[in-house]
Image (cartoon, grey):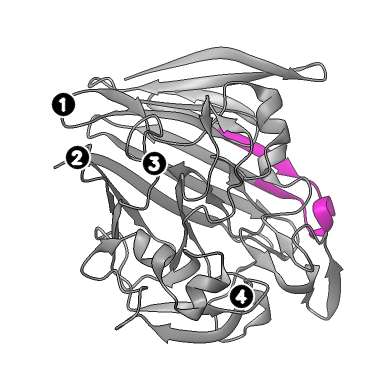
Amino acid sequence: MEVLKERFGQIGSQPVHSFTLRNDHGMEVTAINYGCIITKMNVPDRDGEFENIVLGHDTLDEYHKDPYFLGAVVGRVAGRLKGGSFELDGKNFTLAKNDNTSHLHGGLKGFDKVLWDAKVIDDGVLFSYLSRDGEEGYPGNLYIEVTYRLNNDNELSIQYRAQTDQKTLLTVTNHSYFNLSGNMKRDVLNHSLQLKSSRFLELDEEFLPTGSFLDVKDTPFDFTKGGMVKAGAESNHSQNVLVGNGYDHPFILDVNHDHEIVLKDPESGRTLTVETDEPAVVVYSGNSLKAEGDFRGVPSRKHLGICLETQAFPDSIHHPHFPSMVLDKGEMYSSITKYKFGLE
């Protein structure tokens, strides 16, 4: 295992660095301390060809202008918050409405658009950030650490730890867009997905949970035995059509740390198994990627990548029957998600 630190750019007078984690098999994961963004993941196909399997850019300026949260850690609250406001202990907090009438992924300058401190460790890199009381409208001084580790089993782990000095909301995730074809040779519609999930959350017209749980059985949302991502793009199911022909839905995980999320590209042979202690995964099939701009020379287009966002139930503060995303003063927030790459 080795970690290579290089200069990536500069914000004002502050340097931005990239950190490339490389294991003994040649797998590489590169991240920068701006937004904890994963810029590249180089993994082999069945012929031993190493290629990048995440959407990304080569320059800091492109990430600064990026509207898609590419590869970033998003928070304080991943997903949407209805009305851009919430109440805690009788006090109302107003946030930016950066997605129509909703607050999305932490606001105008969430965790994805700030510079983190970074420390190289034996098998990875530890990013840390102090989010001040009132930042993006959230209460409490929140100290958060995000640790990326790579091992020789071709497994990347992302661990999140945080504490606050006031009651606040917190659920963070990584917003990488995966494309296992390698260097974005194809879109992800012919990727297969398997989820240990028997229910998903119904969304309203603003892509917010209605509060209802829907059974996946006999729908394009049934990935319990595996299915193609294109099922959602080709479906006339009202929930698929609603989000732009595809998926942007929270799936409730029936199990944790037990091969609960498996993505495969049959043509390259690459597989990705995701395990987490979070209660849900938002599967987003890149429905809103526009046909403008590019990712390292590959033209942007719909369904070019798929996000697997492990997190709490979105907007749970407005749904008392959902598991809470409230973090109390002094309480330790801790979460881990593992991404294991393989072949078949």
Point 55% across, 25% down: residue? 119
Dot 1 or dot 3: first in sequence order is 1
- Other-residue count near label 2 (Cα within 10 Å), few / some / many at <14 / 14–19 / ≥20: some
Query: What residue is shown with label 4?
Result: 316
| Circle on res. 314 | none
Measured as percent of width and height from the top left, residue 9 is found at: 68, 16
Query: What residue is shown with label 1?
Result: 47
Query: What residue is shown with label 3?
Result: 179
| Circle on res. 269 | 2
Point 35% across, 59% down: residue? 229
CB atoms at circles 2 and 1 under 8 Å apart? yes
Q: Which residues are magenta?
A: 127-143
Alpha carbons under labels 1 and 4: distance apart: 44 Å
Dot 2 or dot 3: first in sequence order is 3
Q: Nearer the viewer, residue 220 or 77?
A: 220
CB atoms at circles 3 and 4 under 8 Å apart? no
